[in-house]
Amino acid sequence: MTVASSSPPSRLPLSGAEAMAPARKAKSRPGGDGALAAVFIAPAMLGFLVFLLWPTLRGIYLSFTRFNLLTPAEWVGLDNYVRMVNDPIFWDSLKVTVEYVVINIGIQTVAALAIAVLLQRLTQSAVLRGIVLTPYLMSNVVAGLVWLWILDTQLGIGNEIINAIGFDRIPFLADETWAIPTIALINVWRHVGYTALLLFAGLQAIPNDMYEAAKVDGASEWRTFWRITMPLLRPVLAVVLIMTVIGSFQVFDTVAVTTAGGPANATNVLQYYIYGSAFGRFQFGYASAMSVALLVVLSAITVLQYRLTRAGQSDLG
């Protein structure tokens, strides 16, 4: 006679999915990921609120007031904007700024694109890329001072070389005709390496199969560039153009250390005029109005560039 065992049956081992279920439940508890994300975002959000959003809102408010730091802000409505529209120096500064932007963006974009293509097609040496980027590691103030010494009419090594080969010395930063193009070229020298590396990164995203197919079809390098490289690089190039145009409109430090707006206001760019109005003449309300106008102009240019260049679309399908 067989006696049944009274011990309970042993449990089967849990499967891998069942064993991981409690851990998944613990990780997906409500609010856990959101709280962690908020902790990481908080420093950047605090910086955005304190150093960007609040100054912007404060500046918009001050643009409707008369404010000189010594007395409370006095509400004057649209008086600052009316004054700005009728201010010939404001329009001259805007014209000078646009001239600088056109020269800077035109030369910098072409040069950066050429450097990026050469880096991709001929060599991808990290050392060479570091050399190309070197001028960008220098601050605008230092770059401006260095070129101020190099281009000095009497003692600068640049003019010494020009004089040694038989030409007259050129007052690069002291002549109304030469001043803005010279400042634009100084900033091209400093920023072109960084812009080239951004475009180089865009070129790296283009599949190499397309270049090999073009080579098999007998396409020349020039035809390959216009039919493959430029269309596929367009989104990256559009974003780079937006960034460089915004940065060019905000030129200030190079002008401040080389020409101080001269000669005869030939380099009195808008940012320098705003600075002079605020910290030179203590007309903070008027300076704020011009800053708001610059913000509106840059916003309109950015939206127009984004739409015309289709920066949000890619031909890579």
Image (spheres, rainbow, N blue to C red):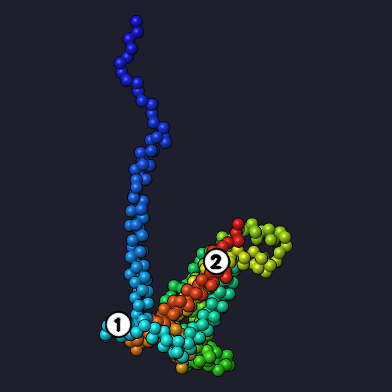
Q: Which residue is mark 1?
A: 73
Q: Position of residue 44 (x, y in %)?
A: 36, 64
Mark before the other along the chain sequence, 2 or 1: 1
Instruction: Report the quarter where the N terminus lies.
Output: top left
The residue depicted at 58 percent of the width and 75 percent of the height is 110
Local crowd at mark 2 within 10 Å, few (<14), some, or many (≥20)? Answer: some
**Looking at the picture, which amino acid does disc 2 mark?**
Ala
Q: Which residue is mark 2?
A: 311
Drawn side of residue 30 relative to residue 183, left or right: left
The residue depicted at 34 percent of the width and 84 percent of the height is 76
Q: Position of residue 189 (x, y in %)?
A: 51, 78
Image: 233 above or below 105: above
Structural distance between the alpha carbons of marks 2 and 1: 42 Å
Q: Residue furthest top?
A: 1
Give the quarter of the image for residue 58: bottom left
**Looking at the picture, which amino acid does disc 1 mark?**
Ala
Drawn side of residue 26 relative to residue 297, left or right: left
Q: Residue furthest front?
A: 77
Q: Say whether marks 2 and 1 touch (CB < 8 Å).
A: no
Mark 2 or 1, closer to the camera: 1
Work out whether residue 174 can be spotted. Answer: yes
The residue depicted at 42 percent of the width and 36 percent of the height is 17
Work out whether residue 157 can be spotted. Answer: no
Please give the label number shown on residue 217. Answer: none
